[in-house]
Image (cartoon, rainbow, N blue to C red):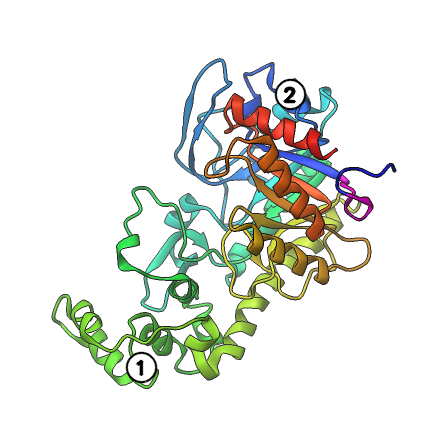
Amino acid sequence: MPETHLGHQEQLLMNVAYAYPWDIVGDPAAPERLAALGVEAVALAASYHATRAATPYHPAHRVLDVPHAAFYLPVRPSAWGRLVPKSPSWTTPDAYLQAGDALRAAGLKVHAWTVLTHNSVLGREHPDLVVRNAFGDPYPHALCPAFDDVVEYCERLVREILTVGRPDALILESCGPMGFGHQSIHEKTAGADWDSVDSDLLSLCFCRACADRYPAGTRDHVKAAIDRYPADARDHVAAIDRSPTPGTRAHQTSTASTPTFTSVEEALGTLADEVRAVRVDLSASLRRTLVAAARDTAPDVPITIHANPDPWATAAFAALPEGEPGADVLVANCWGDPATDTARLARLVELCRPGQRVGAYVLGLPPRPADPEAQADLLRAYAKAGASEFHLYHAGLASPHRLSAIQQALRLIS
């Protein structure tokens, strides 16, 4: 292979553009438009959460409301257990199949973009299966993989996508517990001034399947840390919980001493190692189950996992601090500070086994500029950190100007 502008150490093996089925179904020009970007494959959503999406190219609409999570292949009742995914009403029930056929006709490979535990409609239907924080508050968007029913649902989802969807590769997103962070409708949580450590603490699950896995006293310790009480104030926290006076917690929190924590480990103190082990195992157990199911169903289909080496990570990029030998590609989120993103990529590279690859999940939307040179510089930095795939978000949401910038950036580094 000839040397590129990335250098001989950073040869790209694949560029992957992300898209929704509704970006392709009903738009005959979509497949060729995506192929013209310079990508080899499209990550096509087979299972995806609720959203409100711009459709700047579609002949029939410009804004599409997606009110609930949906499965974009036909829902066969015999394939499911207690949890059954919903079909979409805003596009055809077999939208993934239609879109996939159109993309392949344009010479593109189709990767099944599979969102797992992020499903608000199933969470609301089954509130006993969702993540609950230390205060007992449910997160309806977050199915907890500590429950057998949730693991079974995810396994059935993977098997059905591989069997019916026949993808060229499988991409697993939210392959672990979701957490506090969520772009809910009219989100009103910013004023609480919770920092990143608070967010991680609020992401620890204390549902009935998780609570007993932690050391004794963990729940009260986490409450005290979030509400800024000293770690030895558990009796005080319990007293507040029993208080009949509305607003007592808020009043006490605002007047109590306010220790600050620089890490989850500092906040948890001596509990940190055991709690971290529980959390890491929760993601690892689900991941092992799904990799095994995928290999059993379609042994030759490559598996990509959206991953984060941070052991406290939740959401779309689940915690993977020790690697995953069963995967072919580990993809890191690269939507933030470039120095942080490249360090995350480098850490995933360190976790890779021989033959595994690392991909960079690249943002082509705001706040990134629609500037080909600036985007190319980021791509070079990601490649230098070890990325051999660029996963480009998002070919259906980006304006024509932004899509052109992505196309030019790829050409600049080729």
Residue 172, position as x, y percentages in the image: 61, 47
Q: Is residue 76 visible?
A: no
Between 128 and 359, the residue placed more toward the observer is 359
Residues drawn in magenta: 7-13
Task: Answer with mark 1 or mark 2, whichever residue precedes in sequence.
Answer: 2
Q: CA distance from mark 1 to mark 2?
A: 58 Å
Amino acid type of the residue tagged 2 in the rendering = Pro
Q: Is residue 230 above or below residue 83?
A: below
Q: From the viewer's perspective, is 401 left or right of 331? A: left
Q: Which mark is residue 286?
A: none
Q: Is residue 108 visible?
A: yes
Q: Residue at x 63, y 40 (%)?
A: 377
Q: Which mark is residue 230?
A: 1
Amino acid type of the residue tagged 1 in the rendering = Pro
Between 18 and 101, the residue placed more toward the observer is 18
Regarding mark 1 in the picture, which secondary structure is present there? loop
Q: Which quarter of the figure is the N terminus placed in?
A: top right
Q: Which mark is residue 31?
A: 2
Q: Which quarter of the figure is the C terminus placed in?
A: top right
How dense is the environment of label 1, judged by Cα within 10 Å: few (below 14), some, or many (20 and up)? some
